[in-house]
Image (tube, rainbow, N blue to C red):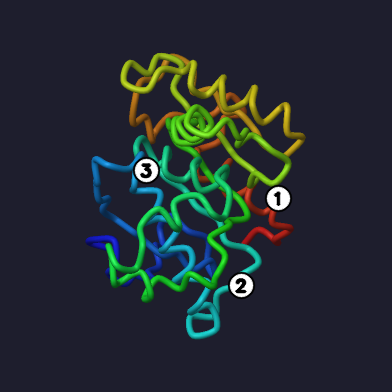
């Protein structure tokens, strides 16, 4: 969507998404300096919108996965790890009357995340602020794709995510993209898979889907 309250686009990418897997796109982020990384607020609202319209678009609301790259991956990891109440009630209806249109009664939880060169910055920001750990057994399963030579979002961020998820017991997998920098979409995994192949196999496994 183009802002916090626009309707997410339900689209299909035939070249990227297996047949029968609908995909919704929230393509822009907003920034409100008073709050930590409010793109997560928008992203959670988009998940609620999708869940509220799941019957209309024939979406299985029990199998919602998310992916992102770079800043988008930081948002996706944030949604995977934050609590339901995080980034939901920090604004009042008086401050933002459009909140009523964001389906606050719906859950913003997702069931899996594909992270392409992101980080746990959102979870760590929140924990520093309120002391509540966001690495928990309630986190969504996570696939972590990251170039080991990334100069923009260092590979150490992937190791931090992997280490944190090891403590939770939640399904996750680290895919080091050896010698690759930021935005390395064409890089293969150590198993000689494309990132799409590895990512969809991970989703099929954790969401208990039959690969198309």
Q: Nearer the viewer, residue 37 or 70?
A: 37
Which residue occupies 32% across, 43% down?
35
Q: Position of residue 151 (x, y in %)?
A: 33, 16
**7 lies left or right of 46:** left
Q: Of the two numbered discs 3 and 1 on the same chain, state the one appearing first in sequence.
A: 3
Q: Which residue is mark 2?
A: 60
177, above or below 193, in the image? above
**77 lies left or right of 99:** right
Q: Quadrant of residue 101?
A: bottom left
**97 lies left or right of 112:** left
The residue at the far bottom in this view is 56
Q: Secondary structure at mark 2?
A: loop
Q: Of the two numbered discs 1 and 2 on the same chain, state the one appearing first in sequence.
A: 2
139, above or below 17, in the image? above
Task: Tell whether label 2 touches label 3 (CB within 8 Å).
Answer: no
Which residue occupies 27% across, 50% down?
29
Q: Quadrant of residue 6?
A: bottom left
Q: Nearer the viewer, residue 197 or 78?
A: 78
Q: Which mark is residue 206?
A: 1
Disc 1 packing (10 Å; few <14; some 14–19; many ≥20): some
Q: Quadrant of residue 4?
A: bottom left
182, above or below 148, in the image? below
Q: Which residue is mark 3?
A: 72
Q: Of the two numbered discs 3 and 2 on the same chain, state the one appearing first in sequence.
A: 2
Q: CA distance from mark 3 to mark 2?
A: 23 Å
Q: CA distance from mark 1 to mark 2?
A: 15 Å
């Amino acid at each position: 969507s183009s802002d916090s309250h626009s309707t997410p686009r339900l689209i299909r990418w035939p070249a990227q998404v297996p047949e029968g897997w609908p995909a919704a796109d929230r393509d822009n982020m907003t920034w409100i300096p008073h709050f930590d990384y409010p793109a997560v607020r928008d992203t959670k609202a988009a998940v609620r919108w999708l869940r509220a319209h799941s019957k209309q678009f024939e979406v299985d609301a029990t199998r919602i996965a998310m992916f992102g790259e770079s800043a988008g991956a930081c948002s996706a990891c944030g949604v995977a790890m934050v609590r339901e109440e995080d980034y939901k009630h920090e604004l009042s209806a008086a401050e933002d009357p459009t909140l009523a249109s964001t389906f606050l009664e719906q859950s913003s939880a997702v069931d899996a995340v594909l992270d392409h060169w992101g980080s746990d910055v959102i979870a760590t920001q929140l924990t520093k602020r309120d002391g509540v750990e966001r690495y928990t057994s309630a986190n969504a399963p996570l696939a972590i794709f990251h170039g080991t030579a990334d100069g923009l979002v260092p590979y150490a961020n992937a190791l931090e995510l992997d280490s944190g998820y090891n403590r939770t017991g939640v399904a996750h997998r680290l895919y080091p993209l050896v010698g690759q920098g930021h935005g390395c979409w064409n890089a293969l995994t150590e198993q000689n898979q494309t990132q799409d192949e590895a990512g969809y196999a991970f989703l099929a496994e954790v969401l208990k889907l039959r690969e198309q």
